[in-house]
Amino acid sequence: MKDHAGVSRTQAFWWVALSYVLALAVAAAIVLLLPSDWHPMKAIALADVAATIVVFAASYLTRNSSFYDPYWSVIPIFISGYLLWLGWENGADHWRSALAFALVCAWGVRLTWNWARGWTGLEHEDWRYGQLAEQTGRWYWLVSFSGIHLFPTVLVFLGCLPLYPAQAIDNAPFQGLDLLAVAVTLVGIGFELFADNQKRRFSLQPANRGKTITSGLWAFSRHPNYFGEITFWLGLFLFGLAADPTYWWTMAGYLAMVWLFWFISIPMMEKRMVARRPDYREVTKGIPRLFPGFW
């Protein structure tokens, strides 16, 4: 880890902002310069990877892979915004397109803010990255690029696929399934918001040091924030399905998110919790792993 002594938190955020402005500029240039006959999602995919490479370069230069952390919640806003613009020219339903964009913005801004308020500066890096560095040694930066940067970019791109039929093409008029999509997406955003805030308030109480939260939404799921996240992506899929049922296959994005949290994120998190808090299993006994049990 590089020595970041003397770099303030404010300066660190400026470095992050600068790297993202550069990444988005590169992505925009690629989309604008590509031949007009390229499929929009193909162009977005290429631009997305290019932007990821720019952010990875910033991570490498600062020796801090957490530079990438907000990318998960930032890039969908720009993908959705671009598709919104295409849709207005292609005859997409304006209500559906605008609502999808507004919800993506609400989710993205909220999640990015949640990251920002917990990031203390260049000396702060997600604990999982330090663990990977210890496990992979000199191969760490290759693992960082492929596993920490590129892999999540691919997953988020898959999650955004339903936005293409929902926002960019001449599609079905606004209907009842769209209302369900709005409701599901709002539930996802709200669930994640309340779960994150409850955990933050719990963690900031000195009396709770070393304890496991089992109150609020955390009494119904061991990872309610993750449940909120995958519910958000389910909502986006429903928007795409409402626009054009032939895009049913874009559910692959939602399923990829479920797979990520069920098989990777949760096992890593719970392994750490058990190591740090021997009573974790006993304290959370009876609480569902991911999907809330309200009954």
Image (spheres, rainbow, N blue to C red):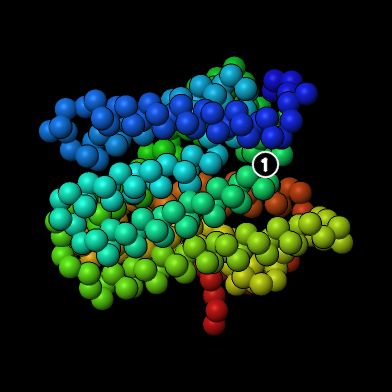
Residue 244 pos. (x, y %): 17, 61
Q: Nearer the viewer, residue 144 or 96?
A: 96
Quadrant in the picture for residue 196: bottom right
Residue type, numbered disc 1: Trp
Q: Nearer the viewer, residue 84 or 263?
A: 84
- At a point 29% along the width and 27% down the height, the residue shown is 30
Q: Residues within 10 Å of mark 1 (few under 14, many from 20)?
A: some
Residue at figure coordinates x 34%, y 49% from the top left = 80
Q: Outermost residue, bottom direction?
A: 295
Q: Name the residue carrying label 1.
A: 119
What x and y, as percent, mark residue 100?
34, 59
Residue 123: horizontal and vertical position, in percent? 72, 31
Quadrant of residue 12 within the rendered picture: top right
> In which quadrant of the rendered image does the C terminus lie?
bottom right
Q: Quadrant of the N terminus?
A: top right
State the image quarter where residue 221 is shown.
bottom right
Position above or below: 60 against 267: above
Image coords of residue 77 (percent x, y): 41, 47
Is 86 on the left or on the right of 65, as rendered?
A: left
Do we see residue 143 in this rendering? no
41 sits to left or right of 22: left
Name the residue at 40% across, 69% down. 184
Considering the numbered disc 1 on the image, is that residue within a helix, a strand or a loop? loop
Q: In this view of the protein, can residue 28 be seen by the observer?
A: yes
Horizontal side of residue 103 vs 189, given as left or right: left
Above or below — where is 81 with respect to 106? above
